[in-house]
Image: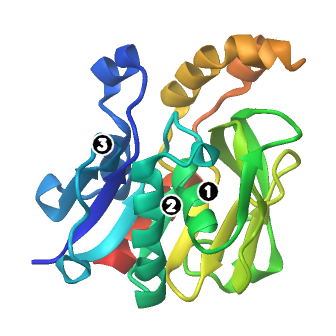
Amino acid sequence: MSKLLVIKTGTTMADLREQRGDFEQWIIDAMGMANHEVIVVDVSQGEELPEYHQINGVAITGSHAMVTEHRDWSEYTAEWLQIVAEKQIPTIGICYGHQLLAYALGGKVDFNPKGREVGTIAVTLQPAAQTDPLFRGLPDTIAVQLSHRQAVLELPEQVEWLASSAMAENQAFRYGEVVWGTQFHPEFDRHITQAYTEYAREGLQAEGFNADEIYHSIQETPIGLEIMQRFAAIVR
């Protein structure tokens, strides 16, 4: 039986992992998938990706790595994702996964010149989102969770631009019919985002942001779960 492939591109902080599990578990839980429906491959540890016929969907996790570091495992995954996109296997890349997918398709990724974007953030949906399978019917502005330093500065050609924020213009895109990238974390809950705000506290303060204000403004974002479950339905 074909399964959802979760491409693990790193691991979270040790204390958060002990409390809540790791990147892949947050995605599996947010999609409402059972573990027997999923294959997890940790490319950051050199594990090989499966043959395309063995999977019916792909989710790419976030990472503490940077796409611009061009690590061997990241470049290998980018090449593999080019074929996934052309085959139109349902795919969602999240944060690092979004950036890696954009890079694989010819977009430009680098450090966000506006600084790091952390916390519960308002994202504006673009006109193309009105007919998009993951976003249609949602409010024009949605609250989502974010934690990133790099961003997609230039979208690949031939993608649909779906969402933006004040800090990062390219918050979501779709390639073809069923391949998405989201800079925001639809799988994060309030607790996870608070943990990442603490993790980023020193950097936020250095860039002139008020980490306490960000921390206390974090809220639950049920639309993120809606997006994840819509994707899971497409995979199934």
Closer to the observer: label 3 or label 2? Answer: 2
Image quadrant where one finds the C terminus: bottom left
Badge 1: few (under 14), some or many (20 or more) residues near its Cα, within 10 Å?
A: many
Q: Residue 122 at x, y = what percent?
A: 78, 47
User: For the point 37% across and 50% down, which residue is it?
Assistant: 27
| Residue sitting nearer the eye, 46 or 156 | 46
x, y percentage for residue 197? 64, 21
Residue 210: x percent and y percent? 83, 15
Q: Say which amino acid is labelled 3.
A: Gln
**In-front residue for pair 18/99:** 99
Label 1 residue SS: helix
Q: What residue is pinned by disc 2?
A: 93
Instruction: Inspect the image, locate mark 2, and give the three-letter code of the amino acid beneath it.
Output: Gly
Check the image and tell me how it is coloured: rainbow
Name the residue: 55% across, 71% down: 180
The label number, if any, that marks residue 25 in the structure image: 3
Is residue 53 something one can see in this rendering?
Answer: yes
Residue 230 appears in the rendering: no
**Measured Cα–Cα span from mark 1 to mark 2:** 8 Å
